[in-house]
Amino acid sequence: MRRLAFSAALIAAMAATAPAPGLAQDLDNGKSIWNKCRACHQLGENAKNMVGPVLNGLFGRKAGTIEGFNYSEANKNSGITWDEATFREYIKNPKAKIPNTKMVFAGISDDADIDDLIAYLKQFGPDGKTTK
């Protein structure tokens, strides 16, 4: 009887500490979602500014600060430092978050896709090297 109670307690403890389904980010999906961004942006060690700025090391960076990119005044003066919450709001509707931005993108509405995109972007440090 003790063994059964111990097994039940062990199973309950393992279940309580296991990641909830759907909460883990899917890097493959993040890479797929990134394909919507890569027409204008680059990532990686050899990334260059294009229609949009390089997105290496995005999180923790002040908006409008990548050298050599011609940002809109709205972006440069937004006062934004990119974090997950700010990026999430921005990527859903860029023109609503930063009116008069030059970014022409309808946005991404699916929260799971945004989670996956954030996880994918976070792999790239300021030097473009990946942490994975």
Image (cartoon, rainbow, N blue to C red):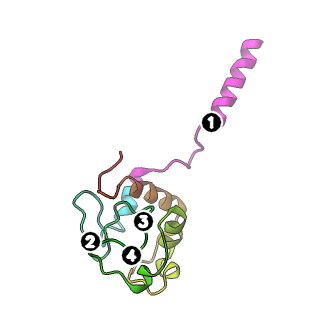
Q: Is residue 27 above or below residue 60?
A: above
Q: Position of residue 39 (x, y in %)?
A: 29, 71
Q: Is residue 97 above or below residue 132?
A: below
User: Which residue type does callout 3 highlight?
Assistant: Arg
Q: Quadrant of residue 74?
A: bottom left
- What is the C-alpha distance between the residues marked 2 and 3? 16 Å
Q: Quadrant of residue 2?
A: top right
Any mark on residue 17, and which? Answer: 1
- What is the C-alpha distance between the residues marked 2 and 1? 43 Å
- What is the C-alpha distance between the residues marked 1 and 3? 33 Å
Mark closer to the chain start, 4 or 1: 1
| Mark 4 neighbour density, 10 Å: few (under 14) some (14–19) many (20 or more) | many
User: Which residue type does callout 4 highlight?
Assistant: Gly
User: Which residue type does callout 1 highlight?
Assistant: Thr
Mark 3, residue position: 61
Q: Quadrant of residue 72?
A: bottom left
Q: Under tag 1, what secondary structure?
A: helix
Side (left or right) of 19 relative to 116: right
| Mark 3 neighbour density, 10 Å: few (under 14) some (14–19) many (20 or more) | some
Residue drawn at (37%, 62%) of the image: 34
Question: The N terminus is located in which quarter?
Answer: top right
Any mark on residue 49, and which? Answer: 2
- Per the rendered image, the range of residues in magenta is 1-29
- Closer to the eye: label 2 or 1: 2
